[in-house]
Amino acid sequence: QVQLVESGGGSVQPGGSLRLSCAASGTISGATRMGWYRQASGKQRELVATISGGTTNYADSVKGRFTISMDNAKNTVYLQMNSLEPADTAVYYCTAIFGIITPTTYWGQGTQVTVSS
């Protein structure tokens, strides 16, 4: 069992930056993939970024602005968010996937990010 706890959310003006952290209760070094999703009010949850074996992928809407990274020693995943836009306002969720044939997915509780002037 892995528990994920996100932190670092808050309110920021357009053009600002935030760094989200996702601390895992157990080791994440064996995770198949770690990622960040977000869900804006009234919209479906969408993928933001993933990291797997050092390979990263990003939604087109955040490419060039967001960076996902992992620190296995700290069992923590980060999402550095720069040049934030009002459209980035959402609850951000961390996820960890273990296994390939029968994957198990863990979710954090989410952290609110609000971008507004």
Image (spheres, helix red, strand yellow):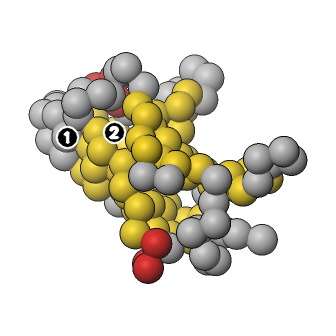
Camera-nearest residue between 101 and 113 = 101
Q: Mark 2 points at which residue?
A: 114
**Residue drawn 77% across the image and 71% down it:** 1
Expressed as whole percent of the image width and height from the top left, the position of residue 44 reads 62, 23
Q: How far apart are marks 1 and 2 (CA)?
A: 13 Å
Question: In the rendered view, does 23 fall on the left or right side of 3?
Answer: left
**Residue drawn 23% across the image and 34% down it:** 65
In which quadrant is the C terminus drawn?
A: top left
Give amino acid for label 2.
Thr
Instruction: State which quadrant residue 55 falls in.
Output: top left
- Can residue 110 be seen in the rendering of this structure? no
- Can residue 82 be seen in the rendering of this structure? yes
Q: Mark 1 points at which residue?
A: 82
Q: Residue 35 got which mark?
A: none
**Residue farthest to the left, as pictured:** 15
Q: How crowded is mark 1: few (under 14 residues within 10 Å), some or many (20 or more)?
A: some
